[in-house]
Amino acid sequence: MPDIRYAKLRAKDPERADPAMPIMRSSRTTLRRLLFPLVVVTLLVLFILAPADLGRRISDLKGPATPKPSSPEPNNAATPAVKNAAADSGKAAVFVEARPLQNMVPVILYFAGILGPTWPIHVYHSDENLGLLNSSAAILQHVERGSIVLHALPTTVHKFNSHDAVSEFLTDPWIWRSLGPAVTHALLFQADSIICGASPLRPENFFEFSFIGAPIAPQYGRGYNGGLSLRHVPTILRTIETFKWAETRMFEDQWFATYIPKLVNPSAPPLPTVEQSKYFSVETIWADKPMGYHQAKRWNSARMSEILEWCPELTLTEAGTLYPK
């Protein structure tokens, strides 16, 4: 039978009834004092981190952010395979255009395909046509891989409104040096030029020459047209550094054809004959089944059915030219 007196005593004064009670009460008080700061700190950490984690989860639900199109720097990152292939080749294709031509994107993509990954294409553009490049998913894919490199034209040359403006730009070392020190051969093409897919010839078949393009008929000048041309970059730079274009103000392609043979110590690689150059490209001098064409319709309108049978890709080009008429 329980002790009734003890039960009453415990009800009135628990600490007297149980000597251990003060110690237990003191321990619980100390524990609460220790736990309170820990709980506060934990709540603060959760309060700070929870929004960031929630933001990440929302971002994950939305998917990766879409990068804003822009004009990459010339040394933009590329996949190792493409980057190494381009760096080891010593080759580069060059496309210079300030106008927003509607066929420029198809022509650039065509050349990227027919030349292949060892010919990275350097596109020199203006603010006026950057939107055309950035709106093309195919162009941006090539840019990401490094097979197309976008360069903003200097503001001083945004308007190619005269022969002088074009020639002055192409006889300045800036554009050729911007290709990189490893590039030895540059293929310059325009929106009114094409390489024919059926041709067994490739630009590499003409690497022995300093400069080659469609031969110019004597009544129009001398040398080779630069609209579709292959250039030995070290020779181009030596010519620019040795002679002054401003003293003559000739068309740049005819200027190079005139002054490259004047280089000495060492002499430059040779220039081609008319017979050799007309199979590289046709413009004002005819040849059957050349590697390419420049302004074919302008100079060979009577032969267009024959040309298109050999080179249907020519339909990508248009009558416009980098050089003002």
Image (tube, helix red, strand yellow):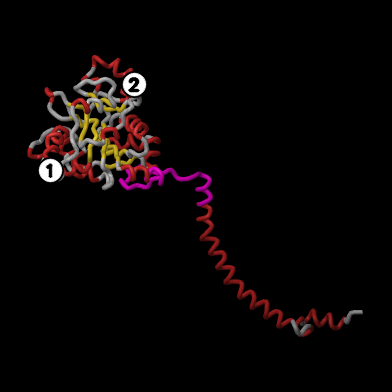
Q: Residue at x 33, y 36 (%)?
A: 133
**Alpha-carbon span between mark 1 and mark 2:** 43 Å
Residue interval drawn in magenta? 56-83
Q: Quadrant of the N terminus?
A: bottom right
Residue 262 visible at all: yes
Residue 233: which quarter of the image? top left
Judging by the rendered image, the residue that carries numbered circle 1 is 264
Is residue 169 in view?
no
Using the image as rendered, state which of residue 148 and residue 29 is in the foreground: 148
Location of the C terminus by quadrant is top left
| Helix, strand or loop under label 2 | helix
Q: Which residue is mark 2?
A: 312
Residue depicted at x 12% and y 44% = 242
Of the image marks 1 and 2, the number of the one nearer the N terminus: 1
Classified by dominant secondary structure, the portion drawn in magenta counts as loop
Residue 126, image x, y percentages: 26, 38
Q: Nearer the viewer, mark 1 or mark 2?
A: 1
